[in-house]
Amino acid sequence: MSTFKAPKGTYDLTPPDSAKYLAVREAISAPLKNSGYGYIETPGFEDVALFSRGVGESTDIVSKEMYTLTTKGGSELALRPEGTASVLRAALEANLHKLGNLPVKLWYSGSYYRYERPQKGRYRHFSQVGAEAIGAEDPVLDAELIILADQAYRSLGLRGFRILLNSLGDKECRPVYRDALQGFLRELDLDEETRRRIEINPLRVLDDKRPEVQKQLTGAPVLRNYLCDDCKAYHEEVRDLLNTAGVAYEDDEKLVRGLDYYTRTTFEFVHDGLGSQSAVGGGGRYDGLSEMIGGPALPSVGWALGVDRTVLALEAEGIELELPSTTSVFAVPLGEEARRKLFAVVTQLRREGVAADFAFGGRGLKGAMKSANRSGARFTIVAGERDLAEGVVQLKDMESGEQTAVALAEVTEAIRTRLA
């Protein structure tokens, strides 16, 4: 028994369950790969200032949840709590926006870290697949990303999710709303920390999940009543594009998301089968983030979908993914000569793209066949001294139980023919 355990609030992915997570990552990324998005990978840690500027000093992520460290050289770093700021930083550093083909469309997959109270669906280490379209202000782009996420979830068989949609306005109309909201919130009976948030980013108070706060928000100014004509027209086009594509959504005037950088379109994917942690993903437009972190004006939009949350959603709907077997052929040698001969066969099968495994450790026939059964292999190759003396191996179909003698020199071709 190991004396070490995974840190609190984290988890290990081990076979066979890990195959579900890989399948979910592949399903989410597949529509992106088919729509012009290229893969990007960033470091697991970044300069603390990247997140404090971009995500926002007032957010819980920055003020309470970031894992930070000081290097031996005195640099202040943070384990990345989200992906957008890192991806935009990397795109700017590589000058991808100067290559003349905007928007820069990128997708990524990785682990993220937040110090939170661990509970089902909320971990301190979690996995996301994300997509960002950098450098274009176009409602078609917003709609595209929402549609691709919807397509990904439906390809997994999910039907119990809902898309919540809102507009947060822009630098022209949001300040007017901000003033009105601050005036309303200052009159409420709120704790000192929430009052501090009113002055920094009052929209974040609307995102407060505490019942004692929510009940006081009845009658709060509604952002849609303050949208300028341009933001209204932009949002209506996003809605029209989703309607035309047949993607159902719900207008949610209280949806603000938890990050400071969002502007105009914001959306969230929720699944009611997950209890209080119902969000499985979300995103929106962040037209000013590039300038916040020292770059040029680059209007952008993106989302991140939680892999762990998506797996929980699949379980909530009772969906079993059809996962391909990791092994097609399992070789069982009986004796030293058979070990050498069958290992050569397994090596050749692997070179030809056939998933093959081997009974290691010199186990007897009974134990080796149990391993073959557990592997899920379609065929098992068994060979002993008598078989090799006759130049054959025994090829067993694990589904039908039929076993036939096949010439050793022809077994690779025989297996490829049967698997075709």
Image (cartoon, grey):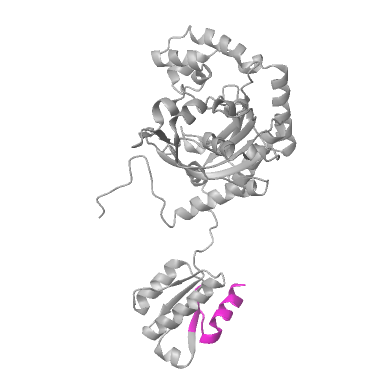
Picture coordinates of residue 346 (x, y %)?
Answer: 48, 75
At horizontal 71% and vertical 31% (from top left) the residue drawn is 138
Query: Is 401 a magenta residue?
Result: yes
Look at the image and tell me whether residue 407 can be seen.
no
Q: Where, quadrant-wise, is the N terminus in this rendering?
A: bottom left
Left or right of residue 343, residue 409 in this image: right
Identify whether 84 is placed above or below 52. below
Q: Where, quadrant-wise, is the C terminus in this rendering?
A: bottom right
Q: Nearer the viewer, residue 40 or 122?
A: 40
Q: Residue furthest bottom?
A: 390
The residue stretch that appears in magenta: 394-420
- The quarter holding residue 68 reads top left
Left or right of residue 140, residue 289 in this image: left
Identify whether 160 is placed above or below 410. above
Number of callouts: 0
Picture coordinates of residue 268 (x, y %)?
Answer: 57, 32
Picture coordinates of residue 12 (x, y %)?
Answer: 39, 49
